[in-house]
Image: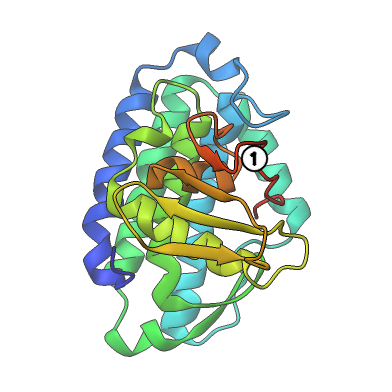
Amino acid sequence: MTTDPLLLTGEVDDATARLLRAATDLDAADIAAPSLLPGWTRGHVLAHLARNADGFVNLLTAARTGERIPMYASTAARTADIEAGAARPPAAHLDDLRRSAERFAEAVAAMPVEAWTATVEARLGPWKAAMLVWGRLREIEVHHVDLDVGYRCADWPEAFSHHLLHEVTNGLATRADVPAMVLRFDGSRHEVVLGDRENAPLVTGPVTELAAWLIGRSSGDVLTVTPDGQLPTPPEWI
């Protein structure tokens, strides 16, 4: 999958449409039920997705105008906004999701070509503006799974899964707390080596399952370990 922001907008539109269809079917009891994220209801996940869209609008605006605008006013403000929005009625969640997605699309459309080269102040540090559309796509796809409404990691588009696996393993390669392992996805000879290859177990499976396991969205029970044994334990993702 390309990371070109203009080419990725269609993927974001499709992922957003899937999310909105899922949210349309939720009633008040569904909203209040637990999500797959510890301590968060489905309402928390939906509120986060809406505020995340607005956070990306802030970063796109910063890239376009040159102003210093952080993604969120503060970590505390981010948490408070999610908590405040979590218990809203289904119609309010759906309207917020739709309107925040529209604001994000408008902010992307307003970007002049040269603005994509800017560096912006994302939540976890500096980020290239050209990566913001990918970042939004990743949020939608991963948190759609977290809603626990029938959308699974196996439903991710294959190109998305490949890019997510590439991004995650690149990040893990620089960390000292990553157990040694060799990853190989089905149907490919290509391997990703993390840590010291000598004596490292080979973990094999579908690319989607490998990516989901590394980010804590799958137990990895469909993955194969060679030699036979337990899966390594990846460190906590972002």
**Residue 24 drawn above or below residue 236:** above
Q: Where, quadrant-wise, is the N terminus in this rendering?
A: bottom left
Residue picked out by circle 1: 231
Residue name at image x 30 percent, y 62 percent: 106
| Image-based side of 73 in relation to 88, left or right | right
- What percent of the width, then of the height, locates residue 130? 39, 76
Q: Where, quadrant-wise, is the C terminus in this rendering?
A: bottom right
Q: What amino acid is labelled 1 in the image?
A: Leu
**Residue 108 drawn above or below residue 49:** below
Asked which secondary structure carries label 1, the reply is loop
| Image-based side of 148 in relation to 4, left or right | right
Choose top left, top right, bottom left or bottom right for residue 68. Answer: bottom right
Residue at the extreme top of the image, as rendered: 29
123 or 231, which is in the foreground?
231
189 or 174, which is in the foreground?
189
Residue name at image x 51 percent, y 67 percent: 58
- What percent of the width, then of the height, locates residue 92? 46, 28
**Residue 145 drawn above or below residue 139:** above
Classed neighbour count for the residue bearing mark 1: other residues with Cα under 10 Å, few (<14), some (14–19), many (≥20): some
**Residue 144 drawn above or below residue 13:** above
- Count the numbered circles shown: 1
Residue 109 visible in the picture: yes
- What percent of the width, then of the height, locates residue 47? 55, 37
Residue 135 visible in the picture: no
- What percent of the width, then of the height, locates residue 17? 27, 38
Residue name at image x 44 percent, y 38 percent: 96
| Image-based side of 98 in relation to 138, left or right | left
